[in-house]
Image (tube, rainbow, N blue to C red):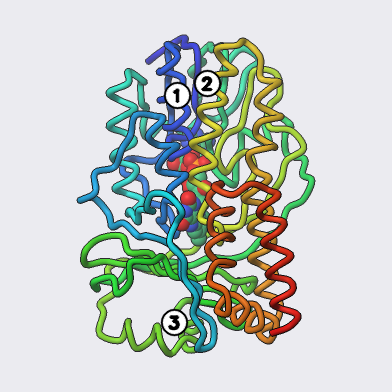
Amino acid sequence: MVKTTDVFVIGGGPGGLATAIAARQRGFDVVVADGAEPPIDKPCGEGLMPDGRAALEQLGISIPAEIGHSFRGIRFVSSGLSVDASFPKGVGQGIRRTVLHSIMVARAEASGASLLWHTPVSGLHPEGVLLGDHFVRCRWVVGADGGHSLVRHWAGLDRYCYDRTRFAFRRHYRVSPWSDFMELHWGPRCQIYVTPVAADEICVALISRDPHLRLDAALTAFPELVSRLSAAEPSTWERGAISATRKLKRVYQGRVALVGDASGTVDAITGEGLCLSFRQAAVLAECFAAGSLERYQEVHRAMARRPALMARLMLTLDWKTSFRQRVMRAFGSDPRLFARMLAMHVGALSPIDFATNGLSLGWRVLSA
Ligand SMILES: Cc1cc2nc3c(=O)[nH]c(=O)nc-3n(C[C@H](O)[C@H](O)[C@H](O)COP(=O)(O)OP(=O)(O)OC[C@H]3O[C@@H](n4cnc5c(N)ncnc54)[C@H](O)[C@@H]3O)c2cc1C
């Protein structure tokens, strides 16, 4: 068992593996420990936006086109109305979590990181981490242990600017994707999104504020989806997860830094969680190289701003069906409005252009 390393990453999900790869790219010795065994599954919408794919490429991972299923944009569907737009640049990729995890594990191993599975970390020590009775000395500790992070608690970083929760359930179906968009279906106080993840499989994820609402019950409000899924076999069991919107006051303390969902989350509706964790990982490794985590705090906050704003804007549509239908009609009357919103979502529109677009949309909504 290893006794010392430069960087010890607690959690070998996408955020932890991304950090391990980024730290190896800068020449650090890295150990990753995870209590589970790969490939690790997790309820997720399984859509990588073009900016997420670009962030993965920075880590030396380009997912071949034949793996997963690409989608060219986003479609909103609500009570008989539908709008869609293509991404301004590149395509998104739907990919099963287990497949993404295997690809990231292979890249982390090839980069020279030591990966310890079935190895839960049991605590922090002033000079490193504890694996039961075993102590590993390290310069930096990374808490990449997900939304319920214990590292966050151990490091005294469990202090929030805000913390809101929704509930998610996802299941896969064996059926050919019927669309080359990732679809977001809006219903009464819930959303269902559909991501193509293979030539013969889709991922269906429900998000709502109701902890008791399950996929089958929610689907009854979506006749179009029901008719598409009626002949499709479920290929996985329904699994639940929390979709939190959580902003922390601080994301590092001393030698301990948080990354990925441990460091705060945006609502799952954005489909930006993975991208954020990959980008945070790259910045964190830069900060290790600079010998200080101060910049990580600033950049982390700045990176979360756009997805957090997009989540807030999108969730205004959850407020009232009549309001949502007005917005859908406004988008329908000028498709450029939706295309620009999507461009902002993936970071391809300046805040000024976005504000102008917002004003045009507001005007259309008022006059719709
Ligand atoms: C319903 C839903 C839909 C989503 N859809 C999308 C989407 O379409 N696109 C997108 O980009 N994002 C999406 N997200 C967000 C995305 O799933 C997360 O942002 C992502 O999983 C974060 O990865 P992570 O590595 O930070 O955390 P996790 O994936 O949670 O990994 C944490 C790891 O830490 C390990 N661990 C925990 N405690 C310990 C310990 N003490 N010792 C060792 N190991 C430990 C766990 O075993 C786990 O492997 C969605 C989220 C939800 C809930």
Label 2 C-beta lies within 8 Å of the nearest ligand 1 atom: no
Q: Secondary structure at mark 2?
A: helix
Q: Going by the image, does 319 lie left or right of 213?
A: right
Residue at numbered disc 2: 285
Q: Nearer the viewer, mark 1 or mark 3?
A: 1
- Name the residue type under label 2: Ala
Residue located 50% across and 73% down the image: 76
Label 3 C-beta lies within 8 Å of the nearest ligand 1 atom: no
- Name the residue type under label 1: Ala
Q: Secondary structure at mark 1?
A: helix
Residue located 56% across and 57% down the image: 270
Distance CA(mark 1)–CA(mark 2)? 6 Å
Residue at numbered disc 1: 22
Q: Looking at the picture, does residue 161 appear above or below residue 32?
A: below
The label on residue 216 is 3
Q: Looking at the picture, does residue 118 appear above or below residue 226?
A: above
User: Which of marks 3 and 1 precedes in the sequence?
Assistant: 1
Residue located 49% across and 84% down the image: 217
Q: Nearer the viewer, residue 152 or 62?
A: 62
User: Which of marks 3 and 2 precedes in the sequence?
Assistant: 3
Q: Secondary structure at mark 3?
A: helix
The C terminus sits in image quarter? bottom right
